[in-house]
Amino acid sequence: MDICKMTALELGRRIRQRNLSVPEVVNAYLARIEAIEPAVNSFVTVDTERALERARKVQKGIDDGTYKSPLAGVPVAIKDNLCTTGMLTTCSSKILGNFRPAFSAEAVRNLEKAGAVILGKTNMDEFAMGSTTETSYYGATKNPWNLEHVPGGSSGGSCAAVAAEECPFALGSDTGGSIRQPSSFCGVVGIKPTYGTVSRYGLIAYGSSLDQVGPVAKNVSDCAAALEAIASHDEKDSTSIRREDYRFTEALVDDVKDMRIGIPKDYFGDGLDGEVKAHILNAVKALEEKGASVEEFDLELVQHAIPAYYVIASAEASSNLARFDGVKYGYRTEDYDGLHRMYKKTRSEGFGPEVKRRIMLGSFVLSSGYYDAYYLKALRTKALIKRAFDRAFERYDIIAAPAAPTTAPKLGESLSDPIRMYLGDIYTVSVNLAGLPGITVPVGQDKKGLPIGMQLIGDCFAEKKIIRAAYAFEQGKSWEAPEISGVLTQGVPGRDGISREGGR
Amino acid sequence: MANKISDETIEYVGILAKLELSGEEKEKAKSDMEKMLDYIDTLNELDTEGIEPMSHVFPVNNVFREDVVRNTDGSKDALANAPLAKDQGFKVPKTIG
Amino acid sequence: MAKQYETVIGLEVHVELATKTKIFCGCSTRFGGAPNTHTCPVCTGMPGSLPVLNKQVVEYAMAIGLAANCEITRICKFDRKNYFYPDNPQNYQISQLYLPIARNGYVEIGTGKTKKRVRIHEMHMEEDAGKLVHDEWDDTSIVDFNRSGVPLVEIVSEPDMRSAEEVLAYLEKLRMIIQYLGASDCKLQEGSMRADINLSVREAGSDKLGTRTEMKNLNSFKAIARAIEGERQRQIEILESGKEVIQETRRWDDNKEYSYAMRSKEDAQDYRYFPEPDLVPVVIDDAWIEKIKAEQPEFQDAKISRYREEFGLPEYDAQIITSSIHLAKLFERAAALCSKPKKVSNWLMVETLRLLKEHGMEPEEIRFSPENLAKLVELAETGTINSSVAKGVFEKMFAADMDPEAYVKEHGLKTVNDEGELNAVLEKVIADNPQAAADYRGGKEKALGALVGQTMKAMKGKADPGRVNQRLREMLS
């Protein structure tokens, strides 16, 4: 038996049954990380000491009944834009290279209350700006399925870590597809919840009106359980929403009978890779065979979502990232003459090219004389996009779509042309603009062996519907881990003679 | 269409954003921004007449805090990450009196 | 003939609200404290922190808006104002531009026939910045975020004022309204009330506005008056020399009595306002407005009429007492305790104002309590102490609040009402001053005064001078 192959819920169960101890589990993952990291680079920080100490504490807490949750004792990796008390939180940027927050993000606190053990912080595109995890100051993360390919982004570290079995589940954040797209590229399950479902307190903001924290895991059940653990109404986040129902695991039911699925025609046109298209349509067919009804429809405004998104996200980012100025925390340039030189040199040396590009664009679209033409126009477009989804959800329970136009591109192929890179977000950004929930679930692999994910989009607060559909689809398929070339993945201690639970 | 970004504009945006670009970076920034703005201009195809700009997706209003002091001395945490500190404050190059 | 110029002035007044906590976090707004002790992740701009609006700020802002005859904006929102400065921890200030809480109001300045309306363009809520302390030795500044996030309202007037006097009257009026509401203590010196002045000049009779400048750093009424005069002169000189006034922000140096242009090229004043995504709209319904209206205090005009009708005070006295909420409260409380409103009013109008002026104090600095003032009035009115003793006791009370009853007792200042004792003294005085007694008897009314004075002296001031007078007349008749 291999601990690192287990799902989060299975680990939790075994830990509660005293079948595995928390330190034993944590040690197994730390060993796995040590073996995998040189090849994959999923993590910016691995805090071995703290993880082991915490593992002992959690074990005690489980023994004395403090921790009862399904995730008690289960290790987790946290995207490096979520604050963790005293633990480096860099946003994969040089400018925050030495930053240790005084508080933990609410989502992280919720996980800790559930008894999860943090292994470390995962790599990402710098300040979540990117779709490949190549813009990280700490080096690109590689796709565990093929180390010459990107894992997607910006939560590429979290998704690669789950795929490479360096952790059973992880937290990511999604501003324009940053959970759903890398989940697709890495063959894992990721949820971007309805805006306001998970507190943004402690999430270092990129585009505040679009950002949401969400889980990444090996399967839908783990993902639903993790979402249930992190979602909460938080008085520290004014945009947090008090929901009536946080019991997302109740939706883990293999039943899609009479579920109405809409297929946006525009999502399956010329821009979509043939293999990706075929696999997703096959998956939809599988749901149809289980009793769902499927219909094509015109979503409209598909082409306009990306420009609207980049205006809004860049504008908010230009303001959100203004605080990184060398005064209160993080990097400050060595030599400077006067305040404004200090600001400019610190920021120019501290931020990478993609971040600077978006800050420049965002500052420009908000500047005097352009606000109406660009920013307000984008907010009006956003209103139209929301309306288009509202109309769609009058007719459909969920929308099935790709998460990206292709499978994971090769390293270095995307960054040269920003517009081409931004076009890759075409199926994901509208969901953020409209505040909707979306889930990515693996549906197969292309001929090169790279994973393909299907995105299921729900109406606001309809996480349960997309979870149910994803769960139903997933039935009968088992977790498939990539074989990571050139990495010795044996030698991780396991126990034999204990049967694995469930059909997975 | 075909936006043109001048040197002055890049310089000006650099002042607003407190970013200093090298000559090469400046040229790249100009061409990137021109391309992006051309792309963003495709929004003008949309008729948004009479549409209210939507900043918040959900009609959530009136989220308040009561006026009760909850925080204690925060100076240690505030200064823990300061690049330069002095007299329990953040040290910066002199601002104009 | 020299051209005549008219000065056109509009004001941006910042008022720090009297909330216990900051506008977006639970940190104390208490003045002072070691640097950065009243801070948290929110008001120091820590990554990941988020603002949550203090409800009391909205209620104070609504109250001020209503008192200044404004329309309350039913859906009001916050915007970010982006600019880099070390006292601004996020490098944006959360403020309101597009949908401020109140608009289109006015206040009346002056009295009687010279009443004038100064219109209020808008009023908005925002957060204050931190404090910079400059270190001259090593060319650095130190940032303290204790004031960062203290709630402010900014009240923006129309350019309706024409002189320094009108500006001061407007500021006094705003200060009075806000103090009545208890929304701020409005102290210019401590910075809880600050005014930026937008000033332009134009040829008399013209109805076109000239180019204006904005002046900052004005921390007293006197500085404001000097700055207006200085800037007016500067602009006229520019126009007279055929040049044009540049629209800019200037900093007033009250020592040099001159203003200096503040901004450099690095401070492009392009604030890139956009809706604050971290805060949700404030929606204000009729019920909320009615509630705030119902809580509004009785303002000056209403108080003046009531003081005249209910207490029979002269208009002038009522006007003076109500010009400060502190005086008005003191008056009402003391009058209620002793039921002698006119006497209380007299103590305030004469002795209190005299002493305030002598010490250069504001009414809110008065130390004695209404209870003790009421006691003093009682002591004086019942003849327990005579008026000159009362004046002396009052001065002591003004210097350091104390119980006048206890003081009178302790120092034996009670008027002697023992007829036997009084008669004995009177007889002695008459015997010792035969000439004065004879003069009085001979019809010299004036001579009586000397005898009264001798008697009072002999009794160490503790006799009732009226009674002494009366008894002497009887004894000498």
Image (cartoon, coloured by chain):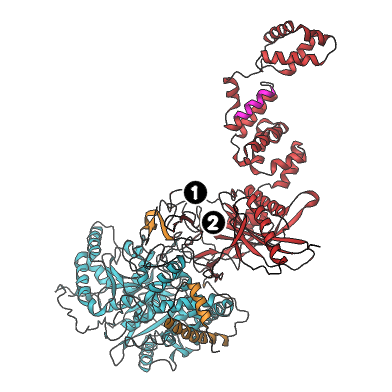
What residue sits right under mark 2 in the picture?
C151
What residue sits right under mark 1 in the picture?
C30
Q: Chain of mark 2?
A: C
* Viewer-nearest residue: B69 or C355: C355
Badge 2 crowding class, 10 Å Cα cut-off, few under 14, some 14 to 19, many 20 or more, is many
Q: Which residues are magenta?
A: C385-396
* Chain identifier, orange in the render: B
Eyeballing the image, is A495 above or below C72?
below
In the image, residue C322 lies at what x, y percent?
Answer: 69, 43
Quadrant location of the N terminus of chain C in the rendered image: bottom right
Q: Which amino acid, mark 1? A: Arg
Residue A309 in magenta stretch:
no
Badge 1 crowding class, 10 Å Cα cut-off, few under 14, some 14 to 19, many 20 or more, is some
Mark 1–mark 2 CB contact (< 8 Å): no
**Left or right for A152, reference A37:** right
**Left or right for A72, reference C410:** left
* Chain identifier, cyan in the render: A
Q: Which mark is residue C405?
A: none
In the image, residue B91 lies at what x, y percent?
Answer: 41, 59
* Chain identifier, red in the render: C
Residue A44: quadrant of the picture: bottom left
In the image, residue C345 lies at what x, y percent?
Answer: 71, 35
* Viewer-nearest residue: A234 or A81: A81
Quadrant location of the C terminus of chain C in the rendered image: top right
**Left or right for A133, reference C372:** left
